[in-house]
Amino acid sequence: MGIGMNEITPIKQDRKQTFTGHQALILEEKLIFEIGSADKSGVDLEPVPEVSNRLGDCMAPAQPDLPGLSEPEALRHFVRLSQKNYSIDAGLYPLGSCTMKHNPRLNEKMARLPGFSDIHPLQPVSTVQGALALMDELAHWLKTLTNMPAVALSPKAGAHGELCGMMAIRAAIEARGELETRRRVLVPESAHGTNPATAALLGFKVDEIPANHDGRVDLVAFKDKLGDDVAAIMLTNPNTCGLFERDIIEIADALHEAGGYFYCDGANFNAIVGRVRPGDLGIDAMHINLHKTFSTPHGGGGPGSGPTVLSDRLAAFAPLPYVVAGEHGFDLIELEAQSADQPFGRMVAFHGQMGMFVRALSYMKSHGSDGLRQVAEDAVLNANYILASLQDVMTAPFAGPCMHEALFDDGFLKGTGLETLDFAKAMIDEGYHPMTMYFPLVVHGAMLIEPTETESRDTLDLFIATLQDLVRCAKAGEMERFTNAPELAPRRRLDETRAARQPILRWQAAEATAQAAE
């Protein structure tokens, strides 16, 4: 399946040292403080007129030591840094549990349209009717795809949406007069780290549920933990092992019978969008990462957006503000007195992230309902293609098929003297960002690969062949290829333990000189 190992001829050579420090088109670049100086400026400014000091003792004792650069210097600096940054626009980005998928340029064009890109949150509602109409339509798509009656658009990220869902659950429990007694939240051991953190932040006690032998929630252990003190379960489906929780409806029914609420982490909705509606599974609240499922920029390309859908049991507690349609157009319900429900409050100053809303709806409408279904199908197909192609040379802890991501452990490295980190660093020399390492924690030396639906078979075949070659070299004892890696990157392997324990968070000339001497 794919390209065979014998079709790839590894290229080995020592790294040549150059006078400039450049390596052909990989240009060495100093820190901006090292290339700039206070006496340079790329712009001409009129002298600042003298005014009386109104800062009192808040006046800074000295001018900030900021570097000055000419325009070409500033431009070259940031362009060179960008060339050192791996991105989804450069190649396959195999991070598991992150869904690093292509961001269509159509979405970017739509987000820059006047009326979306240049509006202000304090404009009169009458002047932003188009934007509110778009938000209302986005909400309709999200509610339809999940079969949920309500959605809060205001959460600004996945973890923020998770907090929103759990705050709605907390408000519902409080409205029932049970907040003092229902203090326990069940969290599977393979959960995202934000799940127990969110529950603890809201004052709940976290109770871990073990996994069974096939990487899913242990149903017997779950039922044993049920009681009238259980507030909710926080479960990810598909889970962080890349597997669908087959018992999810039975879990929901048992939980509801015990009086609890079902929060589902929607991080992996990309694997089931258009095929499974979470509301049909008995879920009460679920955040949706627009960057994962609906292609808005991820991470540094944000800001993020994590809308949270709510079931009938929680819809009345959705936070402010929210959009409503009336006789004279769209309006925002901003105050509790305006609402006929029981909103738990407000999570943000304004409604949300307009640019993300536009990008997400553009993605939905350009794909249509059938296209979104194909997104899920292709994502699952690609992950299983990787699993099937590599399971003979790498070790998979759980039997397939998988959902959106393929999970491997470090069993295949046993006896080689190498670890997951060594294998990942060698991938950098081959031009790949490593997969997610050491997560989920339930698998020793985990390597989690999520190709998403946007990769072609050609890109998958080359990726697969590269990993096959790395495995062959590891088992052949070619230690230096791994322990010295990365050798071809702008920077060699860092002392990650020291970087974590002794981080240098600001640049100072004296510190830079001392570090260089080391």
Image: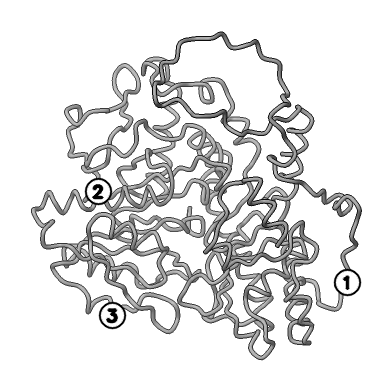
Viewer-closest of 498 and 121: 498
Element carrying mark 3:
helix
* Residue found at x 29% / y 70%: 251
Mark identifier at residue 12: 1
Viewer-closest of 177 and 220: 177
CA separation in Å, label 3 and label 1: 52 Å
Sequence-wise, which precedes: disc 3 or disc 1? 1
Residue type at mark 1 is Lys
Colour mode of the rendering: one colour
Q: Are marks 3 and 1 in contact (CB under 8 Å)?
A: no
Mark identifier at residue 168: 2
- Does 66 appear above or below 304? above
Q: Quadrant of the N terminus?
A: bottom right
Kindly indicate the quadrant of the structure image that contains residue 197: bottom left
Q: Which residue is mark 3?
A: 221
Indicate the position of residue 28 as horizontal and vertical percent values: 80, 49
